[in-house]
Image (cartoon, rainbow, N blue to C red):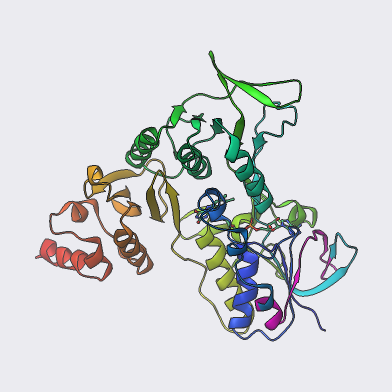
């Protein structure tokens, strides 16, 4: 078979790209090479429903193996791509096989950052990224009584909820002054800190783990946080991820905290694209960014498929609206748009009702909406951003304002007409 599209990484982005290529009529070969031993699966449940047994392993698969087979998508599992020969348009696999490509797409994802504290290789210090990680940690959670979580980001806090609900004593240690500090407004952080406290977790912000103390079997039994020493039988570290960009770097592609791509998701080699968690892409009027979300992986995959299938037609730059979700402490958080830590915040709705949104503003205009148990607000915000509408803080504060009508083109327009009259 002649060289077709070769995809490195069988995660969310790699699988979606293969599916979209076939849906869009790509007739050439499609080969997806992944170093994990499973067909592509959903990662988000690994820190949510999978932990409490709400979802079985078999329910995590993105598609059945037959799905790929029926569509002529070759899935090569348990095999890493070890190098790229850009001169010959070939990749070398850990099995020794060489695969030629017409176009290569890097969808290598990211891996967990490691805590820079010696744990002596203890088997009760866990990280959570893969199905194997989740299996191990779920098993450990069944017996754990004292759980320590390092990092109050999404994964750390979702895990805290799962552990607290099982009746474990949970302590979360976060170096930053507040939980979810990189992702949401202070108001949203405060709400979730309170919700986790109600669930029974102790959340310690502005401090760090100084020492793991191990027993003769090499298991961590105590942890020192400043002057505080507490017993522990399970440690979960969730301190962020680093992009898997070494393969690209060794092949001489431009890399800078992610594989650098242009506005059409093409790397510094026109025969190679990069998508998903591993890709750093430009945004109109803003700094380039790398996003870690299902939306980003899926939308970039669909975009790359469209670009590959319609190679002769001009295509607008990639510019999908970012969105994200997290389930924790019995609440559903959904974020539309992208805020900077310095963006201001205005409540829409009453936080004491447990259903509200925090609207973020930059330079006077809406930049993101963080919705708690308010899926309607979230969907409206996505529509609003997708149609490029600009909402000011003054408009949002008006008593008659509704995100829904603004998304439909109503309120903001009406208000603008009134203002200019
Ligand atoms: P990945 O899904 O990581 O896939 C990349 C794959 O490439 C991996 O299997 C990797 O092993 C493989 N690979 C790397 N290098 C090579 C190589 N050289 N050869 C072969 N294979 C290679 N996002 C949300 O939007 N909402 C959530 O609630 C949410 N929850 C999450 C919970 C957890 C526990 C985790 C881990 C992530 C969560 N995410 C969530 C993030 C989301 O899952 C990721 O952003 C998404 O999976 C990224 O897709 P990807 O394909 O870019 O990377």
Q: Residue at x 44, y 28 (%)?
A: 202
Q: Position of residue 327 (x, y in %)?
A: 43, 50
Labels in figure, total? 0
Look at the image and say whether residue 72 sits in the magenta stretch. Answer: yes
Q: Is residue 217 left or right of residue 202?
A: right
Query: Residue furthest toward the top?
Result: 227
Q: Nearer the viewer, residue 142 or 286?
A: 142
Residue 39 lies in what quarter of the image? bottom right
Q: Position of residue 162 (x, y in %)?
A: 49, 43
Q: Nearer the viewer, residue 150 or 264?
A: 150
Query: Residue furthest toward the left?
Result: 421
Q: Residue at x 34, y 64 (%)?
A: 379
- Quarter of the image containing the N terminus? bottom right
Vertical arrangement, residue 226 with respect to residue 374, above or below: above
Look at the image and say whether residue 253 sits in the magenta stretch. Answer: no
- Ligand 1: quadrant of the figure: bottom right
Does the image show residue 363?
A: no
Residue 100 lies in what quarter of the image? bottom right
The magenta stretch spans which residues?
Answer: 67-91
């Amino acid at each position: 078979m002649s060289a077709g599209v070769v995809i490195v990484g069988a995660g969310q982005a790699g699988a979606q790209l293969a599916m979209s290529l076939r849906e869009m009529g790509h007739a050439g070969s499609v080969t997806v090479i992944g170093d994990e031993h499973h067909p592509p699966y959903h990662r988000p449940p690994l820190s949510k429903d999978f932990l409490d047994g709400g979802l079985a392993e078999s329910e995590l698969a993105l598609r059945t193996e037959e799905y790929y087979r029926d569509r002529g998508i070759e899935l090569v599992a348990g095999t890493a791509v070890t190098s790229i020969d850009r001169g010959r348009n070939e990749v070398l696999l850990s099995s020794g096989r060489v695969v030629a490509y017409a176009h290569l797409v890097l969808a290598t994802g990211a891996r967990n950052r490691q805590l820079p504290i010696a744990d002596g290789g203890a088997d009760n210090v866990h990280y959570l990224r893969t199905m194997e990680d989740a299996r191990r940690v779920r098993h450990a959670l069944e017996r754990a009584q004292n759980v320590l979580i390092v990092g109050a980001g999404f994964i750390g806090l979702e895990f805290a909820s799962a552990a607290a609900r099982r009746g474990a004593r949970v302590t979360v240690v976060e170096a930053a002054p507040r939980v979810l500090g990189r992702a949401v407004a202070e108001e949203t952080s405060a709400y979730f800190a309170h919700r986790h406290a109600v669930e029974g977790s102790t959340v310690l912000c502005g401090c760090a783990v100084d020492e793991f103390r191990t027993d003769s079997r090499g298991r961590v039994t105590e942890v020192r946080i400043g002057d505080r020493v507490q017993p522990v039988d399970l440690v979960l570290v969730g301190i962020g991820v680093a992009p898997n960009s070494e393969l690209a770097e060794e092949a001489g592609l431009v890399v800078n905290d992610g594989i650098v791509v242009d506005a059409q998701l093409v790397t510094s080699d026109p025969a190679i694209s990069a998508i998903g968690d591993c890709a750093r892409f430009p945004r109109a009027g803003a700094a380039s960014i790398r996003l870690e979300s299902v939306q980003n992986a899926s939308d970039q995959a669909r975009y790359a498929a469209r670009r590959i299938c319609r190679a002769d037609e001009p295509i607008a730059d990639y510019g999908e609206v970012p969105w994200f979700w997290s389930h924790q402490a019995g609440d559903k958080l959904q974020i539309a748009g992208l805020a900077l830590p310095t963006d201001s915040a205005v409540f829409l709705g009453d936080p004491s009702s447990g259903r509200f949104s925090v609207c973020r503003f930059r330079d006077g205009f809406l930049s993101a909406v963080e919705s708690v148990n308010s899926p309607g607000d979230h969907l409206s915000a996505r529509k609003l951003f997708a149609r490029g509408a600009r909402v000011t803080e003054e408009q949002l504060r008006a008593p008659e304002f509704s995100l829904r009508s603004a998304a439909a083109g109503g309120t903001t327009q009406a208000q603008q007409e009134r203002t200019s009259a």
